[in-house]
Image (cartoon, rainbow, N blue to C red):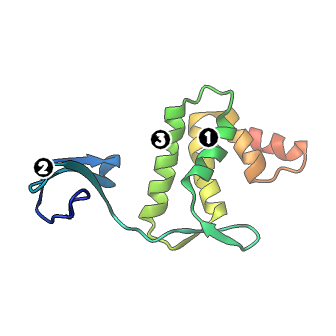
Amino acid sequence: MKCVFCGSRNTEVIETRVLEEGGAIRRRRRCVDCQKRFTTYERVETFPVLVIKRDGRRERFNRDKLRQGILKATEKTVVSAQEVEDLVKRIESEIKQRELSEIESRVIGEMVAEELKKIDKIAYIRFASVFKRFVDLEDLQKEIKKL
């Protein structure tokens, strides 16, 4: 590793920590020549997953967009921020485990809906009303009866 201060290739690792549940490694390094310390991060390079939208457009999977949708559904419920973050991690992990280059937004929506159903019924209904595009009160009533 090249020193960011003097450019020397004579560096050593002082400390190593695993971050993000094994998704990254943080290393503290010291330059043997100039004695300065710096930090580096190593992450596994993955290919982006494309989400196929209902209209056929494709866009990169965006974990922040997923989180915002879940936060909107769980707003003013008892669902904690940590539960939302854990849900986002589970969905993202499941998508990565499938090793697909593309996934339909419908599939992601179904994963989120199933998880929300377990966590909070009101959040599930809010999410489902947008995801399943309820057009009238009857659609909503049918979904509530299914619960």
Q: Residue at x 66, y 46 (%)?
A: 69
Residue 56: name its quadrant: bottom right
Q: Position of residue 70 (x, y in %)?
A: 63, 43
* Three-letter amino acid code at the position of disc 3: Asp
* Front label number (2 vs 1): 2
Q: Residues within 10 Å of mark 2 (few under 14, many from 20)?
A: few
Q: CA distance from mark 2 to mark 1?
A: 55 Å
Query: Which residue, given by chain and number where applicable, does mark 3 sit on?
Result: 86
In this image, 90 relative to 121: left or right? left
Q: 112 or 52: nearer the eye?
A: 52
Q: CA distance from mark 1 to mark 3?
A: 15 Å
Query: Which residue, given by chain and number where applicable, does mark 2 sit on?
Result: 35
* Front label number (1 vs 3): 3
Q: For the residues labelled 2 and 1, say whether their Cβ atoms are less than 8 Å apart.
A: no
Q: Which mark is residue 117?
A: 1
- In this rendering, the count of numbered labels is 3
Q: Position of residue 115 (x, y in %)?
A: 56, 44
In this image, 127 relative to 20: left or right? right
Q: Is residue 147 above or below residue 46?
A: above
**Mark 1 or mark 3, earlier in chain:** 3
* Three-letter amino acid code at the position of disc 1: Lys
Q: Is residue 84 above or below residue 9?
A: above
Quarter placement of the N terminus: bottom left
**Mark 2 or mark 3, earlier in chain:** 2
Q: Residue at x 57, y 35 (%)?
A: 119
> Does residue 7 appear anywhere in the picture?
yes
**Mark 2 or mark 1, earlier in chain:** 2
Q: Which residue sits furthest right?
A: 136
Element on which disc 3 rests: helix
* Three-letter amino acid code at the position of disc 2: Gln
